[in-house]
Amino acid sequence: MKKSIYILSLTVLFFFSCKKSDTVTSPTENKQTETTANSGDPLPSWNDGPLKKDIIAYVEKVTKEGSPDFIPVEDRIATFDNDGTLWAEKPYVQELFAFYRVKKMVETKPELAQKQPFKAVIEKDKTFFEKGGDKALIELVAATHTGMTEDEFETSVNDFFKSAQYPGKNVPVKQIRYQPQLELLNYLRANGFKTYIVTGGTIEVVRAISQDFYGIPKDQVVGTSFKYKYDATKNAVQREAALDHFNDKEGKPVGIQLHIGQRPVFACGNEGGAGDIAMLTYSQGNKYPSFQLLVNHNDSIREYKYQEKDNASLNAAAKNKWHVVDMQKDWKKVFAE
């Protein structure tokens, strides 16, 4: 369950193929830089250039009292996509968690190994998902993400992240975060912005790591959600095997309205699944000066190189004059330690 069911399909195929699709190197070894509004260089992992200057100039003009572009603190809302924007998305962490859940559930109940979709995952039978299409993929997510209380699910997520290694790089998942983006989040917060994650991933998975990974509390995460019911006998909220809101593409502005209640003035996404076009467009409709930022994955050496077949996100960026991160040229470093 990520930017779309199509994305989940790609990850399933990645899982079955067990090979690298791009040439990559180990994450650059550097510690997360804590930035403040008064630091000499608030974005040290960003190369000096037009984009870095534009980001700083925007923040300075909208936070300077008396400026015609001044934005009150309560309206300084910044939204960031997660996969491909704050951390790497080849493959998607959400689906790695689904496979982890299959393993754990079969260990507890071995009989599940003979039932679909568990059997297909264990036997690496990609034909089950190819023939079953969206229905089979949704079945996998529902089977591994539901049927438990929120406390039980959060415990499972935390256990996953304690030991999860990122395929292709063989590092803990925490090390696939983008160092320049961590600095940008810190810089915005130091200047009165409230930062939110707005992701197509399930809200509970991202909430489990948002504070530790990004300094973003769980109540500032907007994501895909399941339906819930209250179990009075257990005095607990139980998740059901049905989606409530799919927070991708046109669903992102809806999710923002439901959870935040106002348009962001700063919005950042990435090209790769066309999932952030609506969010950046929505941000651009703000009554205050706004800033849209799109990460372009064009660095096959330090990260990955890929693009949308129809080039939708980059075309939208050109049409609407959004800022585009050229990963090769704009980032000195890619990954956090």
Image (cartoon, rainbow, N blue to C red):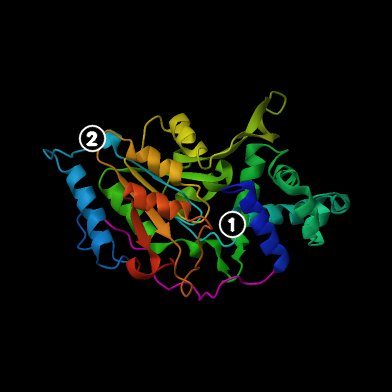
The quadrant in which residue 238 appears is top right
Q: In this view, does 107 lie to the left or right of 211?
A: right
First in sequence: mark 2 vs mark 1: 2
Query: Is there any visible trace of residue 105 in the rendered image?
Result: yes
Give the magenta range.
18-36
Q: Is residue 310 left or right of residue 66?
A: right
Task: Give the residue at mark 2.
Answer: 72
The rendered magenta stretch, by its main secondary structure, is classed as: loop
Q: Is residue 24 above or below residue 43?
A: below
Judged from the image, the secondary structure of the residue bearing numbered disc 1 is loop
Amino acid type, label 1: Tyr
Front residue of 229 and 259: 259
- The image position of residue 203, as x and y in percent, is 55, 42
Task: Give the residue at mark 1.
Answer: 92
- The image position of residue 75, as x and y in percent, is 29, 35
At 55% from the left and 62% from the top, the residue drawn is 173
Query: Is there any visible trace of residue 42 in the rendered image?
Result: no
Q: In this view, does 307 lie above or below 169?
A: above
At 24% from the left and 55% from the top, the residue drawn is 54
Q: For the residues carrying marks 2 and 1, which lies nearer the camera in this image? A: 1
Amino acid type, label 2: Pro
Front residue of 141 and 106: 141
Q: Is residue 163 above or below residue 196?
A: below
Q: Residues within 10 Å of mark 2 (few under 14, many from 20)?
A: some
